[in-house]
Image (spheres, rainbow, N blue to C red):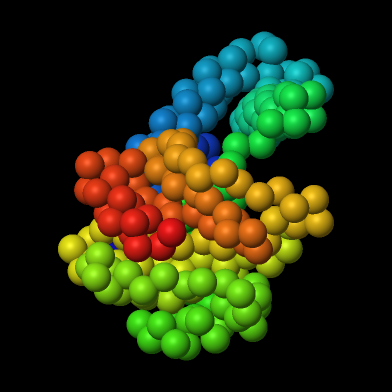
Amino acid sequence: MNTTPPSEHDIHAYVDGHLDGVRRGEVERYLSRHAEHAEEVHAWRQDAQQLRTLLAGDLGTAPSLEAALDPVVIRNRRHHRRVSRVAMAAGLVLCLALGGIGGWAARGMGTGAIAPMADAMQAYQLLAVDHGVGMDITTGNEGDLRAWLAGRVGATVHLPDLADAGFRPMGGRLFATDQGPAAMVLYDDGNGHTVSFYVRPPGAARRLLPRGEREDNGLLANYWSDGWHNYAVVALADAAGRAAAQRVVTRAI
C-alpha cells in the first residue's frame, strides 16, 4: 500500500478537478486515512466550486477580480491566516510561561525561601520517573560507586549500604548545582520500587540542613546534613514509596 502523502501539486489539481483517475484515486485513499487533511481539502473543493459558479457569470470578465478569486490564491490566504493564528497562540503561551517563571522567581527573591533539596526531587523525577536521562555509571558494585562519588563530589561522602533494607544500587548520575557538583545514586528493590540517594555540597554559604521531610509533585524527600554535605533520599509519595524511603533513611542517617 502506498502511504506517501500526495504532493501539493496533486492536491491542487484534485481540488480543481484536473487530476487523472489513477492519481485521483490515490489522493482519495490518502484522504480517507487522514481525516484532518480530508476536512481541509473538502473545504477547498467547496470554495473552488463556488468560485467556478461565480466566475461562470458576468463577474468573471474582470481580470483583477478573477485573479483575486482564484482558488490557489484563496487557499494561500487561508494558509497564511492559519499560520498567523498558530503564531499568535504560540506567542501567548510563551508570554504566559515567561510571566509564570518571572512571578515564581520574584516570589523567591522576595522571601528568600527555597524548598529544601528541590534539586534532589527534580533529579529523581528526571532520572527515575520521566527517564529523561541515563546513568553516567551503571553498576551494582558499591565499591565502584563510592570511588565514583569520591572522585566527583568528595571523599567524605558516605554512601549507605542499603542491602539490609532490601535495596541494591543500579548506578549513578552527576548533576551541576549552584553549590557545586551533585550526584544521585539510584537503588531498586527488585519489585519495581526505586529510591535515590542524592548528595551535594552546602556551597560557600554553608547552607546545612536540619533533618526534615517534605512532599512535592507526588514525590517524598527526606533530607539532612552531616557537616560536609547535604543529603536527600527521594521516593514516590505513595504507600510503597513511603515504606521504602523509611527503610532507606533508617540505614542512611
Residue ID at (50%, 54%): 232
Q: Position of residue 12 (x, y in %)?
A: 55, 43
Q: Is residue 42 above or below residue 172?
A: above
Q: Is residue 174 above or below residue 21?
A: below
Q: Quadrant of residue 93?
A: top right
Q: Quadrant of residue 72?
A: top right
- Closest to the observer, 30 or 86: 86
Task: Indicate the quadrant containing the C terminus: top left, top right, bottom left or bottom right.
Answer: bottom left
- Closest to the observer, 51 or 122: 122
Residue ID at (65%, 75%): 154
Residue ID at (22%, 42%): 239
Left or right: 192 in relation to 130: left
Q: Position of residue 27 (x, y in %)?
A: 39, 50
- Closest to the observer, 56 or 151: 151
Residue with the most extreme left position:
191
Residue ID at (75%, 53%): 206
Left or right: 180 in relation to 86: right
Left or right: 46 in relation to 189: right
Mark count? 0
Task: Indicate the quadrant containing the N terminus: top left, top right, bottom left or bottom right.
Answer: bottom left
Left or right: 194 in relation to 83: left
Residue 67 appearing in the image: no
Residue 147 appearing in the image: yes
Q: Position of residue 69 (x, y in %)?
A: 68, 23
Residue with the most extreme front position:
227
Q: Position of residue 104 (x, y in %)?
A: 69, 28
Residue with the most extreme top position:
58
Q: Is residue 228 above or below residue 111?
A: below
